[in-house]
Amino acid sequence: MSPVFKQNLKGYAEKLIPRKRARTKARYNSEELKNDNNDSMVIVSNKILSIIQQREERQQKEAEKREEKLRLEAEKKKNNVSDTMKEITGLDQHTKFKAVTLIYSLDMKDVFADMSVEERFGWIQTNIS
């Protein structure tokens, strides 16, 4: 081959535009597409997780409010000896008043309120005679 012919071939080869992508480029592009899909899936997944977390937080706050309300009602009932005294039947007013006075003087409102109606009746009969 002559040197001129070799130069022409070399110049011709340099001018050719590749018609197909190289395998590495094609692989890179498909990986890029997968990453784009994964990114959008991650974004959607994160949004779903965020919504679920917000819902759980809201439910937890509501549960805490209900528990607090029940606790306050129970506390109110414990501190209201006269309401617990009304549940006891078969006692005259004088005996009930003496019992309330004794309960407060012994500072046993909580203990008295935690008793069943029968236990309260028994406690009053034993201590107020």
Image (cartoon, rainbow, N blue to C red):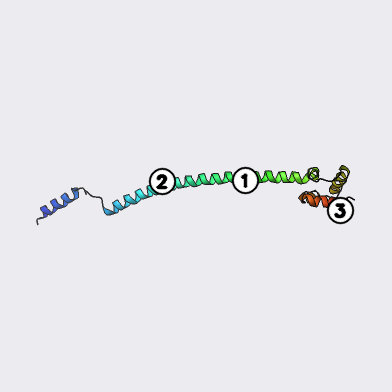
Amino acid carrying mark 2 in the image = Ser
Quarter occupied by residue 91: top right
Helix, strand or loop at label 1? It is: helix
Q: Looking at the image, is mark 2 or mark 3 nearer the viewer?
A: 3
Q: Residues within 10 Å of mark 2 (few under 14, many from 20)?
A: few
The residue pinned by badge 2 equals: 40
Q: Percent position (x, y) of residue 116?
A: 77, 51
Which tag, 2 or 1, sits closer to the chain's start? Answer: 2
- Mark 1 residue type: Ala
Q: Is residue 9 above or below residue 80?
A: below
Q: Amino acid at mark 3?
A: Thr
Q: Mark 2, mark 1: which one is toward the viewer?
A: 1
Outermost residue toward the left in this view: 2
Q: Residue at x 40, y 49 (%)?
A: 38
Distance from the alpha carbon under mark 3 to that under mark 1:
42 Å
Residue 15, percent across and down?
18, 48
Which numbered dot is residue 63? Answer: 1
Horizontal placement of 39 versus 120: left or right? left
Q: Disc 3 marks which residue? A: 126
Q: Secondary structure at mark 2?
A: helix
Classify mark 3: helix, strand or loop. helix
